[in-house]
Image: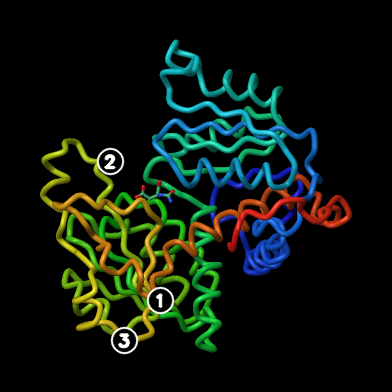
Amino acid sequence: MEFTGSHILSIGQFQRADIERVFQVADSMEPYAQRRRVTRVLEGAILGNMFFEPSTRTRVSFGCAFNLLGGEVRETTGFETSAIAKGESLYDTARVLSGYSDVICMRHPASGSVSEFAQASRVPVINGGDGPNEHPTQALLDLYTIRQELSGLNKGIDGLRIAMIGDLKHGRTVHSLCKLLTLFKDIHLTLVAPKELGMPEYILDELRTAGHQVIHSSDMSQGIGNVDIAYSTRIQEERFVSKEEADHYRGRFRLNQAIYTQFCQPNTVIMHPLPRDSRADANELDNDLNQHPNLAIFRQTDNGILIRMALFALVLNVVDQVESCSRAVNWHSGNR
Ligand code: NCD
């Protein structure tokens, strides 16, 4: 794909070579993410960071990634502080804000909304999550993490065995990750979910067309028994009609130290897009795994910076200038 000037809206835009390109550029961002060097390559550029749904790591890591490339960030968070609350359309908002920014990241509760916004935007738009639909940058950072975790075990992504656990119906991270895995070969997926919260049929179709093996299970202990990756997810309470309906599913699949030790193979890597719901009635991924070496959740969040820096550098066509605009840092903020 041509990255320069492109919107990043769906994983469906990417070919396997494009993923390799993103990962290669992400690798080259390490000195800046680790604060060994600073680059000013995006000096003067402005990111419009528009988040109309709760977000911590996606919003902040998009902002930090842009700052780390030398650019500035303007944020809009929540409908109540935006003119959308006065009835303004996505079209008008996009026309206006794209005049103020060089690139826009957007999260919105409605499926397809970020694409609609992008059609009216005069600058590239990156999807930070559109309702239950997609979350392409999360899938990229998840796959980057999977690749990194498995490389230590001399395994690649082809042939991967992964269990996805939880609310697979509403979870946009697993939707995008499944789509991304269709670009690879011989993937074994075990989908662990209550029947009503299963993976949408159109995604199952894409997985089957790719020739992947898909097993459905409502028994987590079985599902996590023979996998490289156990990918846990939160019940997406905000997508249910009522809190009571979400309560019905909360706490069904809990991964903790005892369950991991009893049912997982010793090398199984534990992932979660975060936030994990740490309230007692949910707790899908227990704190007692925090020190476990196979818990990759905070390596995922660190990798989010590299992937988002790479996407900005590619979309704004500055990959070749990052290094020439750089110097060593003046400060030392501890061991990263
Ligand atoms: C996820 C999201 O917002 O889709 N979080 C994230 O971006 N890392 C997952 C979730 O909210 O459960």
What residue did someone put label 3 on? Answer: 265
Q: From this viewpoint, which residue is outermost toward the top?
A: 86
- Label 3 crowd bin: few (<14), some (14–19), many (20+), radius 10 Å: some
How far from the left and from the top, in percent, is residue 295?
38, 70
Would you say 326 lies left or right of 300 here? right
Mark 1: secondary structure: loop
Would you say 220 lies left or right of 127 here? left
Q: What is the three-letter code of the residue carrying label 3? A: Gln
**Which numbered disc, 1 or 3, marks the residue that appears first in the sequence?**
3
Mark 2: secondary structure: helix
What residue did someone put label 1 on? Answer: 293
Q: Nearer the viewer, mark 3 or mark 2?
A: 3
Mark 3: secondary structure: loop
- Label 1 crowd bin: few (<14), some (14–19), many (20+), radius 10 Å: few
How far from the left and from the top, in percent, is residue 199?
31, 59
| Mark 3 to mark 2 CA distance (whole Å) | 33 Å
Q: Residue at x 17, y 69 (%)?
A: 218
Q: Nearer the viewer, mark 1 or mark 3?
A: 1
**Which numbered disc, 1 or 2, marks the residue that appears first in the sequence?**
2
Q: What is the three-letter code of the residue carrying label 2? A: Arg
- Label 2 crowd bin: few (<14), some (14–19), many (20+), radius 10 Å: some
Q: Residue at x 73, y 52 (%)?
A: 314
In the rendering, which numbered label is found on residue 239? 2
In the rendering, which numbered label is found on residue 151? none
Would you say 169 lies left or right of 5 here? left
Would you say 58 lies left or right of 97 here? left
| Mark 1 to mark 3 CA distance (whole Å) | 13 Å
Q: Nearer the viewer, residue 176 or 316?
A: 316
